[in-house]
Amino acid sequence: MTRRQFLAAAAATTWLANYRALAAVETGRHKIRSLDVMVIQGPDRNYTHVRVNTDTGLHGIGEGYGSPGAGVKEQMLALEPLLIGKDPLEIEKIYVGLTRHTDGSAHMFMRGVSGIEMALWDLAGKILNVPVTTLLGGAYRDKVRMYNHGGPSNYLDKSACREWAAKRREDPRGFTCVKFSPGRTTPATDVGHDPANRVLTNTELRNIRTGFENSREALGWEHDIIVHCHWEYDLRSAIQLAEAIEPIMPLYLEDPLPVEYNESWRRLCDASRVAIGKGENLARRQGFEPWIVNAAIDVLNPDLRNTGGLLETKKIADMAEVYYIPFYNHNTGATVCTMATIQWAAAIRDYIACETVVNRYAFMEELLVLDEPIFQDGFIKLPNKPGLGIELNPDVAKAHLADGEVWWG
């Protein structure tokens, strides 16, 4: 073990000691009895919810990936026999046992494992009567900044940019950070565009520079911008893209290169004055390690539904902190996943902002029983109730069940 690896491992022990001290009183008093899974349907995708039940009547809820990524419900139910009779407070032991039966992929059983692990933390907090953030080592912040999606209808049109910016300022949720993607041309409008390659044409680069400058002018500097890619460019194009958007000072450039690790990621970070980020497709510490230790990333944005859950992602953050790498979150989940992510994010020292799609659909903001609006001035307040601090609204959940699904109450 290198000195750096030792320091990363040592950093992960503080929260664990806190958790073990709290859990000592209740260990052995509760056993997992069953697992319930239901799928809630949104307008364009669905959301897989899981409940872990105990023989003492307590339960914990979590959320795994929905569609795209169908089959997570079946993955969770296939893991149920491995949970029955286990002490729910032995979360790491259960997690290791579950992952021995998976292939480690972010897009297979790990998505089922992650949702179950999330529910176990909710359950542990309820058993121990403390918020999950306390179990993870304590809260660095009492609210977490959120960002949402959506650029102008035409960012080359200044009037369209002004209209878009005005709507954002009028949004009662108060978001001050937004993520959207560069536009692409087509072969019909750009003779240099070849949809088979990863190259940005000169026309596209000029449009990107102009479009993001128009967007920044319309928004002003009180808003932050994240530039969202979809693993679609080659190295030189990614460097040129970073240069094109540098004047608007984006928070970071997300996923400009293909998903797999190679030296091009490090070369991009070295060349770019804009921070480079990724993380939503990665699972476990092993998936994040090459980017962290090889200085091939500037910021990380894991998705708790892919990584293995809250504990594994806390360990990833502990590793990254040794290298001074800050965190955002990828989060296209519904409200349960969002609130679990808030608990995790509050416990991470170098944390900046969390993605959300909850604001897109009215039913998502009503899916939980809440005393106040979920979004306040672009933030979500950290609940101080036990576990994840949330309770599903059964009427709303029942009204939005996917075909063939049954409320688990």
Image (cartoon, rainbow, N blue to C red):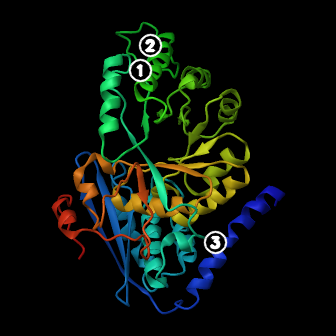
Q: Is residue 124 visible?
A: yes
Position of 352 relative to 367 (above/below): above
Residue 15 is labelled as 3
What residue sits 53% from the left and 26% below the top?
248
Kindly identify the amino acid type of the residue bearing the numbered disc 2. Answer: His
Please rate how many residues cluster around mark 1, counting C-alpha atoms within 10 Å: few if below 14, some from 14 to 19, many from 20.
some
Residue 184 is labelled as 1
| Sequence-first tag of 3 and 2 | 3
Q: Is residue 2 visible?
A: no
Q: Position of residue 173 (x, y in %)?
A: 33, 48
What residue sits 59% from the left and 89% below the top?
24
Labels 3 and 1 touching (C-beta < 8 A): no
Labels 2 and 1 touching (C-beta < 8 A): yes
Please rate how many residues cluster around mark 2, counting C-alpha atoms within 10 Å: few if below 14, some from 14 to 19, many from 20.
many
Position of 245 relative to 126 (above/below): above
Q: Measure the C-alpha gap from mark 3 to mark 1.
A: 45 Å
**Which quadrant would residue 22 be assigned to in this image?**
bottom right
Please rate how many residues cluster around mark 3, counting C-alpha atoms within 10 Å: few if below 14, some from 14 to 19, many from 20.
some
In the image, taking residue 109 as reference, residue 3 lies left or right, namely right
Q: Position of residue 3 (x, y in %)?
A: 83, 58
Secondary structure, mark 2, is loop
Residue 193 is labelled as 2
Kindly identify the amino acid type of the residue bearing the numbered disc 1. Answer: Arg
Q: Measure the C-alpha gap from mark 2 to mark 1.
A: 9 Å
